[in-house]
Image: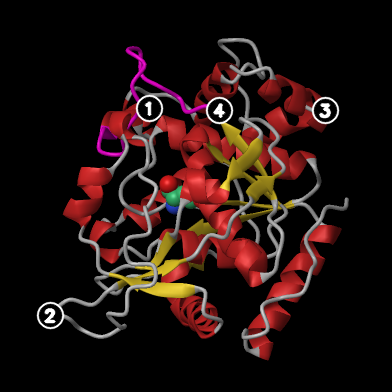
Amino acid sequence: MSFSGLSSLLPSLPIHVADLIQAGLAQREQTYRGRFAPSPTGVLHRGNLRTALLSWLEARLHGGEWLLRLDDLDTPRNRGGAAEAIQADLQWLGLDWDGPVIWQSRRRGLYATVLSALRRAGLLYPCRCSRRLLADISAPHGSSPVYPGFCLGASHGWGMVEQRLPSWRMRVPRGRLQWRERYGRPGDVDGPEAVGDVVLRRADGFLAYHLATAVDELTLGISDVLRGDDLWSSTAAQVAVMAQLGAGPPRYGHVPLWRDASGHRLCKREGSDGLAGYRSRGLTAAAVIGAMAASAGLVPQGSQLSAQDLLAELNWRDFDCGIRAGF
Ligand code: GLU
């Protein structure tokens, strides 16, 4: 397995962080290493669980490792008991992960160090645009707004002004952002036009998802990210952060979300769509795995089989073709 990735890392990175990134880049060249990275903001619904199943299958079919990372940085959004429920649900389904669970909240020091290095390198600037202003300029139809660069070059400093701290934005240089995409739209977008300058530290002091995720994919040696296609558009921002750190991205595969009968996205608050709902209807793990695999076109409808049996039935080429064909 070989893909581009090693270039020269950002010189302002402290040596221990540069070493961690180099080790991660070397590791992903050697082994398939995937991950599932839910936010503990609620119970996983069948859509999240199907994505977890596909990510697990892909990793195991490649003889690779599969990590469980909990994206719990946005603490006000975390729900008590959700992290435990996520682990219990994955275990019940037989989706075993390698090594200890990785909590982003325990890695804040690493993210903050990387952020400081980006700032020292002159790649960040303070931004004082309010959410309201940004909402007013946001693109129609809910597509994510591209920041128009109002604060780029402004000299209002990093400190408190009118009791507010600025957010920290990373400049996204001109040029294309590219990544290898297995299942979704090709990973090739114009940085400034499609992404714009990315917030890496929010005005309320929280470290942003794009920063933590980019640092994690690199330092954890992630070779392949399989996740829902709602995150396709986040990928370019994460690739931009990696590029500023001097590293290439992992491979990505964005798979369709499982929608309800009327075509709407499932939402974590709909508890009945979680495993508790299935269990209360008396379904076994084999029935749930069968239903999830059938919905992705991997086995016939009505199949009942354990995650391990499903794994034994598939090979990675059929899996790859099946997922590429869409479901
Ligand atoms: N934690 C994020 C979520 O649950 C996504 C993480 C990812 O796969 O990059 O939506």
- Of callouts 2 and 4, which one flags the residue occurring earlier in the amino acid sequence? 2
284, above or below 91, in the image = above
Q: Secondary structure at mark 2?
A: loop
Q: Position of residue 18 (x, y in %)?
A: 69, 81
Q: Which disc is residue 289 wearing? A: 4
Query: Nearer the viewer's eye, disc 2 or disc 3?
Result: 2
Measuring 39% from the left and 72% from the top, which residue is drawn there? 153
Looking at this view, name the residue that lies furthest to the bottom.
Answer: 15
Q: Which residues are magenta?
A: 256-271
Magenta residue check for 261: yes
Q: CA distance from mark 2 to mark 1?
A: 49 Å
Q: Amino acid at mark 2?
A: Gln
How busy is the neighbourhood of tag 1: few (under 14 within 10 Å), some, or many (20 plus)? Answer: some
Q: Position of residue 318 (x, y in %)?
A: 79, 23
Relative to the observer, which residue lies in front, 166 or 56? Answer: 166
Q: CA distance from mark 4 to mark 1?
A: 11 Å
Q: Position of residue 115 (x, y in %)?
A: 49, 77
Q: Main secondary structure of the magenta part?
A: loop
- Of callouts 3 and 4, which one flags the residue occurring earlier in the amino acid sequence? 4
